Image (cartoon, grey):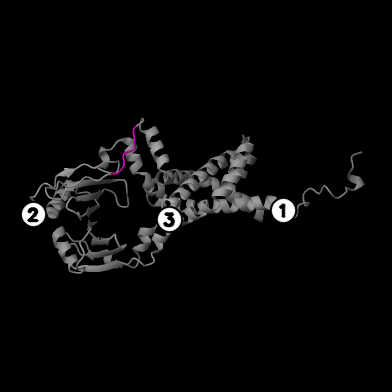
Amino acid sequence: MRRVFKWLHLWVGLVSGIIVVVVCLTGGLYAFKDELTAIGKPWRHVSAETRPALTPSRLLAAADREVKGIKATAITYGLKEEAVKVDYAQWNIGENTAIYLNPYTGSVTGVERQKADDFRFFDFLLKGHLRLWLPNPLGRQVVGYGVLMFLLTLITGLVLWYPKRWTRKSFKSHFTLHRPFKFRRLMFDLHSVVGFYVLLPLIVASFTGLLFALEWFSKSIYKVTSGNRELVEYVMPSTDTTQVKTLPHAIDRLYARLSKEEPQAVQFYYALPQEPSGVYRVSIVHEQGSYFKQDNRFFDQRSLTELQGEGFYTGKYDDKHGIDKWYRMNLDLHEGRVFGWFGRILMCLASIVGASLPITGFILYWKRKHPKHPARNEDLHRPKHPSTFPR
């Protein structure tokens, strides 16, 4: 069995190597996108005040004066020291304008514009991470099956790493780097010893990534873990278009209602309806930086009646089934956000080490197949001195 695992580890690793290097490097660099993009943008923050923030309608009116001829698509209220953000997304042409306003005065603190042909570094990284810059859905399939092979190499690598017998010498050999640092031995230690320390984070990142990349994998895991339930696709509800009467200042009423219901929330994201059948989609975040500790609720744009969507991402987090909560947590597990800054740093370092594993593995394979001095250790062709013959 060890010979089978060794064969699988070698050839599956060689086939998926380039995919793993790209996916791990882009994922590691993308991990701190929010913090890095906020550097040098002081207009995103304001001085906190004790008075309440202005209503959405007043802030939207102030933002509309800066962006004429475009309808606002979303408004985001954050913490007291954060500026309110109003988005004007033009999905048909790939452009977006974001207006930042002081929530207490309505004055504009900053404007961010993204053109369709602008180079966005983190968008470039994300496309590489998700699909190797290939067209969809081909790229996602290539990445998905590449990560599936990487998961197999991690499991077979653990089997090969595990010693036949634990002794003090084998324990030290498997958990520490060997000195002096000679090239071939160092490559082996970086591949085996350092690789073991990041094995668990890489398995978690690979498994959670597969839930995004491969639909059949996600549906199968959900069915097994939920007791034979089918995975329901995400579907938003629609506004009742037969109803003519519309509540005045609907967005202000909704804002006041939800602010009273969830006073401890750290962020309210209001996606504004763009069509007569559209709804108010509100994401209420309960923990800063968390994707899964939030409620995704829907409201009729005319009557503000709460509507129900389909899929595990819809509704309140606390009301969901255990497996649905786990699926909601998938992205946070993938990025390490579940464990805060420690988890994110750990996942970033694990991704960088994961990118090095195919490289060190290939070097070891190449050195074994093409030794520089093939007869240095055991020269079978040179005749031995008579004094070495057995008597």
Residue contact at pointers 2 and 1, CB within 8 angstroms = no
Three-letter code, disc 2: Pro
Considering only vertical position in the picture, is 167 above or below 130? above
The magenta segment is: 229-234
Q: Position of residue 182 (x, y in %)?
A: 67, 55
Magenta stretch: helix, strand or loop mostly: loop
Q: Is residue 232 magenta?
A: yes
Neighbour tally class for label 1: few under 14, some 14-19, many 20 plus, Cα within 10 Å:
few
The crowd level at tag 3 (other Cα within 10 Å; few <14, some 14-19, many 20+) is few
Three-letter code for the amino acid on which mark 3 is drawn: Pro
Q: Earlier in the sequence, mark 3 or mark 1?
A: 3
Badge number at residue 135: 3
Q: Residue at x 84, y 49 (%)?
A: 381
- Looking at the rendered image, the disc whose residue lies closer to the viewer, 3 or 1, is 3
**Residue 288 position in % (x across, y down):** 30, 52
Whole-percent x, y for residue 122 in the image: 40, 61
Residue sitting nearer the eye, 186 or 332: 332
Q: Is residue 170 magenta?
A: no
Using the numbered discs, state the Cα–Cα distance from disc 3 to disc 1 in whole angstroms: 40 Å
Tell me the SS state at disc 1. loop
Q: Which mark is residue 205?
A: none
Label 3, label 2: how far apart the Cα atoms are: 45 Å
Q: Which residue is mark 1?
A: 371
> Residue at (24%, 50%) from the top-left corner?
283
Residue 90 placement: quadrant: bottom left
Number of residues whose C-alpha sits closer than 10 Å to that of mark 2, classed few (under 14), some (14–19) or many (20 or more): few
Label placed on residue 248: 2
Q: CA distance from mark 2 to mark 1?
A: 80 Å
Amino acid at dot 1 = Pro
Q: Residue at x 48, y 52 (%)?
A: 351
